[in-house]
Amino acid sequence: MNKPELIEPFENALINPAEQVRQWKKENGSKVVGFLMTDVPEELAHAAGFFPYGIINGKADLEKADTHLQTWVCSHARSSLALALGNKLDFLDGLIIPQTCDTTRMLLDLWKQVQPLPYMDDFRLPRQVDRPSAKNYLVSELKRLRHGLEQFSGCTIDPESLKQSVNLYNQNRKLMRKIVDLHAQDPALISSREIYTIINGAMVMPREKVSELLDGIVKALEEQPYTEKDREPVRIFLSGTLLEPLEILDYIEEFGGTVIGDDFQNGYRYIESDVVLKDNLIEALAERQLNRIPSAAFDIEHKPRRIFLSNLAKEKKARGAILFHIKFCEPENFDSYDNLQAMQKNGIPAMRIETQFGRTGLGQLRTRIHAFMEMVGGGSK
Amino acid sequence: MSAKNIFKTATLMKEIMARYNNAGKEAKKNGIPVAWVTAVFPVEIIYAAGLFPYYPENYGAVAAAKKIADKLSSAAEARGYAQDLCGYARCGIGDAYADEHPIGEILEPDLLFCCNTQCGSLPKWFEVAGRFYNAPYFLLDTPRVGLETDELCKDYFIEQLHEMIAFIENFSGNTFDFKKLSEVLALSNEACRLWNEILDTAALKPAPFGFFDACFHMAPIVTLRGTQEAVDYYRALKEEIDERIEKGITAIPEERYKIYFDHIPCWPRLRWFSELFASRGALVVASQYTHSWAYSFDLERPLESLAENYTHEFVNRCFDYRVQRKINFMTRYGVDGFVFFSNRSCKPNAIGLYAKNKLIREQTGLPGVVFEADMSDLRFFSEAQVLSELEPFFEQLT
């Protein structure tokens, strides 16, 4: 099989996620637990026999949420709720929302009011990771979450199943990181759009299937010979809470660029680290969460986000950075100015762009990216 | 709170707040570290540690009341802090970058403490400030609590209080004085008790004191909770209210209806709102906002008790708890209707408000309304729009 054929299932899953989820339900006779991106221990839900499904589609009819959420609430929350209200998530049996901001802290309760599901829980992440209390708390919170999942499934999550799920997710992440690395060595192997299609597609597909496909993709990429190019693409670093819409990647490539790093929840943050296999897997899940790369949810004293990002961009030899901000996303907005300053201080030209789920003007977005690419040495192919 | 109806005690408040502000300015000269704190924060520990607690939120509220939130925000907005961020935060960050300081400069912190029970905007603002002023920052993290008592959150909070005390000791070089904490907690208990007795007088028919009065008189319970000044102040206010009850002086001239209001008031239009309600014979009698400071600490187990009070505060509770709490207030104060303020600046209180409005109307049969504005920024306030939202509500009062 060649590469486009291997990537097609991910594309299709993003275009029409419901179809393959329903198929899975029919085949497995089990339940689907949705989650909002993305700091959720999916491994626990998977080990309980559920299909962890990432709610990701940006093409919702936002007006559907208007009677429940103010127009100035972040469009990710609005579009997720709108999907549910538009019956686009009617295959969900459960929902976990990670509390990473004020909106996600309030959303589950509201969702319960307007579209209750048999299982609904918050994942109450600690908002600091610098002190020992964070780990003690998180371990207990993960146990609480596990207990809820067990009650919903009707059986206990045995350590062996959890180990298998952890292995599967680790393998998935490892393969996706491999693809990212291969792309960094030779951007011509696979496009940026294809990479993020894979990462996002994986969130809405059965994990076992994802593994098979990723294996095939890695093999196909490794077999592909290196081709001499007239000119190397301009290396661009991206940052933000969520990458939306994926067209961003098309425009960057259209104007001679390629994406070599990011910290999006639906990007590198989703795959950057694994759960260490050890006897106490709950503790291992907690450690993975605590050691994740910084995000906008809270700053990390021993690894400040702005320093982390600007160093990473430099390390990846980025010639420019674009900082994305989902409109009305408070945490990201509080970080943006200092992130921008840090990039510029590190000698990386940077700009900010605001997007919205379902509402981004693509023409204007393309124009802005074009202008930035011209500035950092890109241009039309 | 009409102009003719100003409390004598108001003069006293101006004096003690001026003294407090002055003490802040003097603190640095006297070698007392300035500690930024948030409104719902165990400030008792800060007082006991001998630090000067400063409330940047108050700074935001003062800027809002002086109707300059938009001007003060402009230096922040110019740097990309968007208009949809919390108005207090925009004022604070704006002042940091501004060249002009129409209400005086925000007091520069030596260290920053934040508790995120109230919201996620405060910690993000304090992170920005910590970077700007290059001062150490400590977050007391409070995961949200549901309907029931939550031991997990409580234990996490207690462990963090120990971490916080170590953080302060490390900063100051002094051993934390638990005896002093006990004294501060006792003062805090007394101020809270008096404050809540005062708030309760709004249930009298007609009442001598209402929500808009409470907004005017709340500064000491927020900032000076844990000091003798706060106790003295609320004792004086309580006496004055008792006198008013005897003399038959009421909060508004003709009280026909009692109203429940959530949450923070619209500071730049406080008087306009109070006069609007008064003109309809409606006295706003309660809000979970002014009732936030209702702590009761057990001096025998100070840290546990601080954890119980601060983690289980309503702002940190789930939807169902808040609905129940609102209904309890409505019952206790015998209200005829309720008004919910969908405040752009305050997402934790605004999100879910439409559903709460519907649910509470169904459960209580009371008329209720949601209006849209911002607590500090007049660019998001339209008199015509607010009136068009409130008029049909007033007509439903019977």
Image (cartoon, coloured by chain):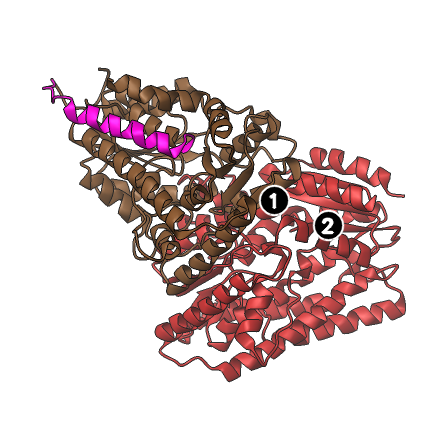
Chain colours: A brown, B red
* Protein chain holding label 2: B
Q: Is residue B171 left or right of residue A61?
A: left
User: What secondary structure is marked by label 2?
Assistant: strand
Furthest-top residue in this view: A381
Which range of residues does the magenta coloring cover? A203-229
Which quadrant of the figure contains the N terminus of chain A?
Answer: top left
Residue A136 quadrant: bottom left
For the residues marked 1 and 2, what is the alpha-carbon distance in whole angstroms? 21 Å
| Vertical order, B205 against A158 (above or below) | below
Residue B114 percent coordinates (x, y): 47, 60
Residue A52 percent coordinates (x, y): 45, 37
User: In the image, which is nearer the foreground, mark 1 or mark 2?
Assistant: 1
The kind of secondary structure the magenta stretch mainly shows is helix
Which residue is pictured at 75% across the width and 63% down the height?
B199
Residue A39 in view, yes or no? no
Residue B164 percent coordinates (x, y): 43, 69
Residue B352 in view, yes or no? yes
Query: Residue flagged by tag 1: what amino acid is it?
Result: Asp
Query: Residue flagged by tag 2: what amino acid is it?
Result: Phe
Foreground of the two, B108 or B104: B108
* Protein chain holding label 1: A
